[in-house]
């Protein structure tokens, strides 16, 4: 029996109906794959997220935070830790000499880009093609179409060592699709973040957003997926290497390496996480053998494997 389950009475007394047992996580992931969480706690504000983190850490209850569920593959066996489902989605545009947008970590990243564009603020158009939440994007230095979090983040509010702190981009230690958090060099949870904007004609920004969305539809496959499976190796593209290894269209169960883009693994319905895992290992082995390149996962494996 897990520590989280043993603490259920304490959690129930504190959080009431916000705490649920044995909840399937598949509906909360972009790939629609994954087994159950023993315990799932839903929070709807950055303050509630902070309070939940304080409560469970003080009692040494193991936990993990789940936002939009992109870039993660949840195991079929599920998750034994308490899963905190982050639905903190407040957002505010600050119209100042140097405009910015402040967003809770549970805000859908692409929605934030569309909302700022609609009000005539530029700088985040590239993010209209990025799935997941602000928290996940800040955690992993999400990027697309020439932009990334590192280039526009002003500050991140994080829960660290029991305190609410403000971290600069330098403290996040950003690299290509990585940060000190994703690399495990520091442990913190993103609560909210501020991003720089610039004033622009709404029509101009809207056109840029539309170009990004068209570009995404033209190059990325439809259907449920985790997003890019592997990081692009230096000077290369993971999708091209997978295609060169003749793996596009390969299936295990209902999981398929997309015919449109080799770095996307598609769930065709009722797909097992183990099927995706088998495709991951197949792609890694084949690309290493035929191209001499070791692919590094961009997604994270979550749960009991």
Image (cartoon, rainbow, N blue to C red):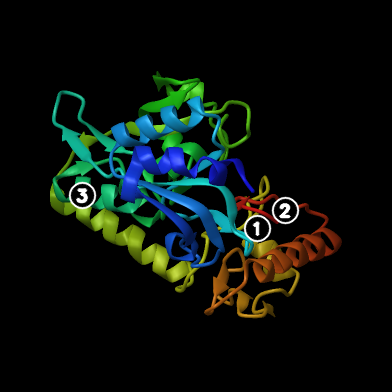
- Binning the other alpha carbons within 10 Å of mark 2 as few (below 14), some (14 to 19) or many (20 upward) gives many
- Please report whichever mark, 1 or 2, sits nearer to the chain's N-terminal start: 1
Location of residue 248 with respect to 204 vertically, above or below: below
- Callout 2: SS: loop
The Cα atoms of the two marked residues, 3 and 2, are separated by 35 Å
Q: Residue at x 48, y 55 (%)?
A: 70
Q: Residue at x 65, y 58 (%)?
A: 238
The Cα atoms of the two marked residues, 1 and 2, are separated by 7 Å
Of residues 12 and 274, the one nearer the viewer is 12
**Labels 1 and 2 touching (C-beta < 8 A):** yes
Q: Residue at x 50, y 65 (%)?
A: 31
**Can you give x and y, in whole percent of width and height, for residue 274 in the image?**
68, 67
- Callout 3: SS: helix
- In the picture provided, is 57 more to the left or to the right than 95? right
> Quadrant of residue 9 in the image?
top left
Location of residue 65 with respect to 21 vertically, above or below: above
Q: Nearer the viewer, mark 1 or mark 3?
A: 3
Q: Nearer the viewer, mark 1 or mark 2?
A: 2
Which dot marks residue 238? Answer: 1
Q: Which residue is mark 3?
A: 115
Q: Residue at x 47, y 55 (%)?
A: 69
Name the image quarter holding the C terminus: bottom right
- Callout 1: SS: helix
The Cα atoms of the two marked residues, 1 and 3, are separated by 32 Å
Q: Given the current orientation, which residue lies at the most extreme right position?
A: 289
Q: Which residue is mark 2?
A: 295
């Amino acid at each position: 029996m897990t520590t989280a389950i043993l603490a259920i009475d304490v959690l129930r007394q504190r959080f009431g109906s916000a705490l649920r047992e044995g909840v399937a996580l598949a509906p909360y992931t972009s790939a629609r794959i994954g087994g159950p969480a023993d315990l799932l706690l839903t929070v709807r504000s950055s303050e509630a997220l902070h309070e939940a983190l304080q409560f469970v850490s003080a009692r040494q209850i193991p936990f993990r935070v789940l936002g939009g569920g992109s870039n993660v593959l949840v195991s079929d066996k599920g998750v034994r830790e308490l899963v905190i489902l982050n639905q903190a989605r407040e957002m505010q545009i600050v119209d100042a000499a140097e405009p910015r947008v402040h967003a809770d970590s549970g805000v859908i990243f692409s929605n934030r880009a569309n909302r700022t564009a609609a009000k005539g603020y530029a700088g985040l158009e590239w993010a209209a093609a990025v799935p997941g939440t602000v928290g996940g994007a800040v955690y992993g230095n999400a990027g697309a179409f020439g932009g990334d979090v590192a280039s526009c983040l002003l500050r991140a509010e994080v829960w660290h060592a029991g305190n609410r702190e403000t971290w600069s981009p330098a403290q996040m230690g950003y690299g290509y699709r990585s940060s000190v958090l994703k690399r495990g060099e520091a442990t913190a949870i993103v609560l909210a973040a501020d991003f720089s904007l610039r004033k622009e004609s709404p029509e101009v920004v809207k056109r840029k957003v539309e170009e990004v969305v068209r570009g995404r539809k033209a190059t990325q496959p439809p259907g449920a997926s985790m997003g890019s499976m592997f990081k692009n190796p230096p000077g290369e593209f993971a999708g091209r290497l997978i295609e060169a290894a003749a793996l596009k269209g390969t299936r295990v169960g209902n999981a398929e390496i997309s015919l449109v883009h080799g770095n996307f693994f598609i769930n065709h319905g009722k797909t097992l996480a183990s099927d995706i895992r088998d495709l991951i290992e197949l792609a890694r082995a084949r690309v290493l053998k035929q191209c001499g390149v070791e692919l590094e996962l961009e997604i994270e494996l979550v749960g009991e494997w």
